Amino acid sequence: MIPRDGALTSLWQDNTLPYQAKNKSVDNEYDVVIVGGGITGITTAMLLQDAGKRCLLIEAYQLGFGTTGGTTAHLNTLLDTPYTTLITNFGKEGAKQVARAATEAIRSIKDNIHRYGIDCGFEEQEAFLFACDEKQSKELDDIYQACQEVGLSVMEADQIPVPIPFVKAIRVADQAKFHPLKYVYGLASSFEEAGGVIIQQCRVTNAEERDNKVYIETNRANFEAQTLIYATHIPPGINLLHLRCAPYRSYVMAIRLKDNNYPQNLVYDMYDPYHYYRTQNIDGTDYLIAGGKDHKTGEEENTQSCFELLKSHLQKHFDIGEITNYWSSQYFEPADGLPYIGQLPGHTENVLVATGFGGNGMIYSNIAARIFKSLVLQEENEYQELFSPSRVKPVAGFAHVVEHNADVVRQFIGKLFAAEKLDVISSLERDEGRVVKFEGHVMGLYKDEDGALHAVNPTCTHMKCSVSWNSAEKSWDCPCHGARYSMDGKVLTGPARHHLEEIQVKGLMQRYKITSDWPVLSVD
């Protein structure tokens, strides 16, 4: 099992051992430094190393720690943002480009699997989208027409793979599925065999552009490169893209069915938020992987209830035997429906970024990697302009915002609070977190299963928003730009670079006793 950015373990991470890098030597200078050990970073590193560049990949934790380890790994051209919206926002030709790029991404992933001999359970599939009422049916008609206009192989469907009542459905050919971590590990191994270098447990703390180079500081060593690529899901620091990407969380379950009636292909309903379904065989065992109940990060008070709602929905339609894994994962929705891939706004052409993948990270990761390769090698790429972050226009006064928020003011340094003065502690249940006010200060308090208190300054170190407690993942989540922290304030996911400040509280264990249990998800 590998660790991840939360308390819950995904199906993929539960069945995978940590990646062991094979580095024998590490230099301080490279052609390209890629930050982020998910599918975007590994794919980019492999493409550039194979093209003759000397590449270093840096990962703050371990490969697959973040969203790649929490994905449901749908490889689809039937995207979350429907082609009706893409035609409206980018024109018919732009939407056709998106469909073509997505089709090429699936083909590229398939080619990588064959070329590098990766055993990752890849299977070609169809995708089904179904409507459950007349309003959804009308919307589905529009999507069907748009899919035809952009060139997808789409047709009406009389049946769907899941036992759910519906009024209309369509099916799209040339989709696929796979085990994302096995694929990433296979690419990582091939990258190292080609001469690439991977450093895990290495967090970037700063990067500066000087003399047509980028100088990168980390907690392990300093490096310099011609090009720095942020493949971190959202770029660190403060950037215009943070104002154009909204963080969301989605909830997933891996299920063993009593009747073994596992649905084939990829399936989606049309509710908002929608549900999604597919099956994956891992080491001879089938799992139904289903998800939904999405919401903006930090805006759901009881995240545990999202799992209960998802379980209730699935029990209506499937003969559930065992829920083997349940977890949530984060994604970023772009303002206009397409990711931002290319030069990071406000920086030189030496600093590149990919973000805003929505729920289609597996597809857009490959598109991003191929665009990055073209930019670094100064090749033509027909998708470069379509996905360029330059479509994000400067915001008046943003430079002042950056300066003002560059360093969050520390409020508690040198202070020690006595537990007996914190009356709120007595009302905290075991495994409960809460933001409270005390003596003019705002604190984030979490009482763990042993009754020990974990206290932090709840001011997000990114842009000074206040974090919220995520009861399911046991993390402090920022609703503004998606930064997430552990119970002790350690950064789990960007864009924050700095941990939350810990607050010292003395004497909790002697004064308060554990009074109750946190509810555990059941399958009965």
Image (spheres, helix red, strand yellow):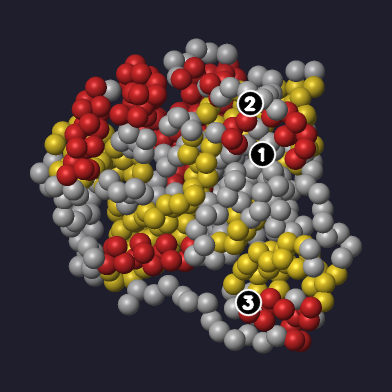
- In percent of width and height, residue 164 lies at 19, 56
Give the structural element (helix, strand or loop) at label 3: loop
Q: Relative to the observer, which residue lies in front, 285 or 480?
A: 480
Q: Residue furthest left?
A: 158
Label 1 environment density (alpha carbons within 10 Å; few <14, some 14–19, many ≥20)? many
Query: Which residue is at 80% across, 22% downward?
Result: 210
Give the structural element (helix, strand or loop) at label 1: loop
Asked if residue 448 is positioned above or below residue 63 in the image, the reply reads below
Q: Nearer the viewer, mark 1 or mark 3?
A: 3
Mark toward the start of the polypeptide (3 vs 2): 2
Contact flag, marks 3 and 2 (Cβ < 8 Å):
no
- In percent of width and height, residue 31 lies at 68, 24
- In percent of width and height, residue 148 lies at 22, 25
Q: What's the CA distance linking mark 1 and mark 3?
A: 33 Å
Q: Is residue 219 visible?
A: yes
Q: Quadrant of the C terminus?
A: bottom left
| 342 displayed left or right of 313 | right
**Residue located beneath label 2 in the image:** 395
Q: What's the CA distance linking mark 3 and mark 2?
A: 42 Å
Q: Relative to the observer, which residue lies in front, 284 or 323?
A: 323
Query: Which residue is at 67% across, 25% downward?
Result: 396
Mark toward the start of the polypeptide (1 vs 3): 1
**Residue located beneath label 3 in the image:** 428
Which image quadrant is residue 172 in? Answer: top left
Badge number at residue 236 = 1
Amino acid type of disc 3?
Leu
Mark toward the start of the polypeptide (1 vs 2): 1
| 243 displayed left or right of 348 | left
